């Protein structure tokens, strides 16, 4: 039986791992919850560090015949558990700028353990409805409260609503647009991350790849690869919550722990509703002008004279 203090501690630290952009960290003092990277995940190349969802954004072919460059931009989950060897590897990769889009509450609960690099906190969060705090409360509400909050499809709807919010919220759009501008002007490799590298990081990556002309199936492949990379850690963390009597139905949390195609599709649908096309989302929603898009293509695309993507960018669900 957990003491009241220990129960609050486990709930609080568990919420840090279950919030949007699930953490790749242990739950409080529960050693069995340490995440493990998948043996052979799909998607772009893994960085092979203890952050299970750290990977290269590049390697995908575009519709124009160009290739998204590797070794230029990286995405990841939180870097709070990286080892000294991991930091040495990040340094060898030449990463000099790390962008953290976690909320202040998430970042304070699990501060990054960084190599020598410029660190930019750029939170994508709603101060009036912090997902970290919301999940904390849901876990603390016990099995009945968890079922009321997450059951009957409510967890998945919560996620779809969040993905739409990232498109409609001016602050979220500003942070995404600023990150893409940083990529466009980067002269050395850059890494951006949230807590598990799947939702906020997943949308930034999907927008970037779509803007560069990567076909929709590959954009979704990159997005859904987070499920494989985080699976072992998610399983261990839910098992720890069950063992401590905090959760009795792990399936309620599945939509929060992973990603689904319809989550990202909700963002793309909202882009259509709000802006009419993906190109107008880039220009009017994110504030990216033609010169920025040209610079982004020059930074990110390879293969000689491959043409620069033109507006409107992307096809299918992205338009």
Image (tube, rainbow, N blue to C red):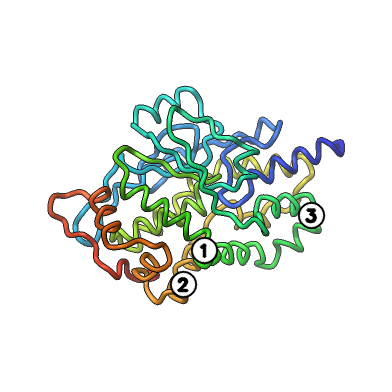
Please state if 165 lies on the left or on the right of 150 as rendered. Answer: left
* Residue named by callout 2: 269
Quadrant location of the N terminus? top right
* Residue named by callout 3: 143
Q: Residue furthest left?
A: 305
Residue 271 falls in which quadrant of the image?
Answer: bottom left
Of callouts 2 and 3, which one flags the residue occurring earlier in the amino acid sequence? 3
Q: Secondary structure at mark 2?
A: helix
Callout 2 touching callout 3 (CB < 8 Å):
no
Residue toward you, 38 or 116: 116
Residue toward you, 162 or 37: 162
Quadrant location of the C terminus? bottom left
* Residue named by callout 1: 170
Numbered disc in front, either 1 or 2 = 1
Q: Classify 10 Å Cα crowding around label 1: few (below 14), some (14-19), many (20 and above).
A: few
Q: Secondary structure at mark 3?
A: helix
Of callouts 1 and 2, which one flags the residue occurring earlier in the amino acid sequence? 1
């Amino acid at each position: 039986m957990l003491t009241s203090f220990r129960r609050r501690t486990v709930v609080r630290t568990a919420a840090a791992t279950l919030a949007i952009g699930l953490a790749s960290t242990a739950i409080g003092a529960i050693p069995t919850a340490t995440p493990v990277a998948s043996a052979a995940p799909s998607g772009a190349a893994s960085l092979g560090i203890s952050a299970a969802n750290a990977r290269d954004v590049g390697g995908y072919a575009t519709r124009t015949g160009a290739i998204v460059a590797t070794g230029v931009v990286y995405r990841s989950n939180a870097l709070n558990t990286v080892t000294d060897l991991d930091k040495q590897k990040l340094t060898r990769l030449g990463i000099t700028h790390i962008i953290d889009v976690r909320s202040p509450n998430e970042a304070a609960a699990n501060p990054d353990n960084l190599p020598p690099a410029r660190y930019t906190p750029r939170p994508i969060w709603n101060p009036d409805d912090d997902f970290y705090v919301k999940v904390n409360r849901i876990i603390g509400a016990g099995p009945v409260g968890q079922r009321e909050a997450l059951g009957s499809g409510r967890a998945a709807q919560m996620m779809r609503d969040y993905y739409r919010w990232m498109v409609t919220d001016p602050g979220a759009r500003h942070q995404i647009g600023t990150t893409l501008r940083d990529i466009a002007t980067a002269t050395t490799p850059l890494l951006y991350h949230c807590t598990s590298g799947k939702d906020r990081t997943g949308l930034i990556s999907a927008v970037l790849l779509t803007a560069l002309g990567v076909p929709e199936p590959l954009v979704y492949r990159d997005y859904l690869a987070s499920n494989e990379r985080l699976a072992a850690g998610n399983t261990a963390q839910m098992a720890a919550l069950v063992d401590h009597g905090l959760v009795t139905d792990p399936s309620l949390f599945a939509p929060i722990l992973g990603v689904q195609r319809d989550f990202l599709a909700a963002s793309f649908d909202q882009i259509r509703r709000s802006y009419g096309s993906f190109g107008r989302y880039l220009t009017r929603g994110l504030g990216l002008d033609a010169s920025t898009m040209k610079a982004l293509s020059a930074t990110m695309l390879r293969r000689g004279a491959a043409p620069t993507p033109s507006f409107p960018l992307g096809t299918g669900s992205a338009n």
